[in-house]
Amino acid sequence: MLLGLKWYWWLVILAALAISVPFKVTFLKWWSKREQGKKKGQHGKWGG
């Protein structure tokens, strides 16, 4: 028992992290591409 949690709760937490980390990385890559596209679009659209 670590920090008052039983061993199976740690497995649940680790599984949730293992699932969420790749999604977070994918989302951050998509977001950065989206932001770069916005900047390019704003620059060309209004000439500023």
Image (cartoon, rainbow, N blue to C red):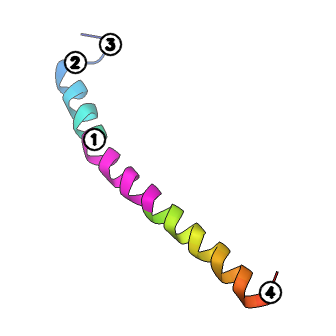
Query: In the rendered image, which residue does mark 4 sit on?
Result: 47
Secondary element type, mark 3: loop
Q: Percent position (x, y) of residue 12?
A: 22, 34
Question: With respect to residue 21, does 37 lie above or below?
Answer: below
Query: In the rendered image, which residue does mark 3 sit on?
Result: 4
Q: Which amino acid does label 1 sit on?
A: Ala
Can residue 27 be found in the magenta stretch? Answer: yes
Rate crowding at label 4 as few (under 14), some (14 to 19) or many (20 or more) other CA atoms within 10 Å.
few
Tag 1 near tag 4, CB within 8 Å: no
In percent of the image, x 26 and y 46: which residue is there? 19
Q: Percent position (x, y) of residue 16?
A: 28, 41
Tag 3 near tag 2, CB within 8 Å: no
Secondary element type, mark 4: loop
Residue 30 left/right relative to 19:
right
Give the number of the mark in front: 1 or 4: 4
The disc label shown at residue 6, or none: 2
Between residue 47 and residue 33, name the one nearer to us.
47
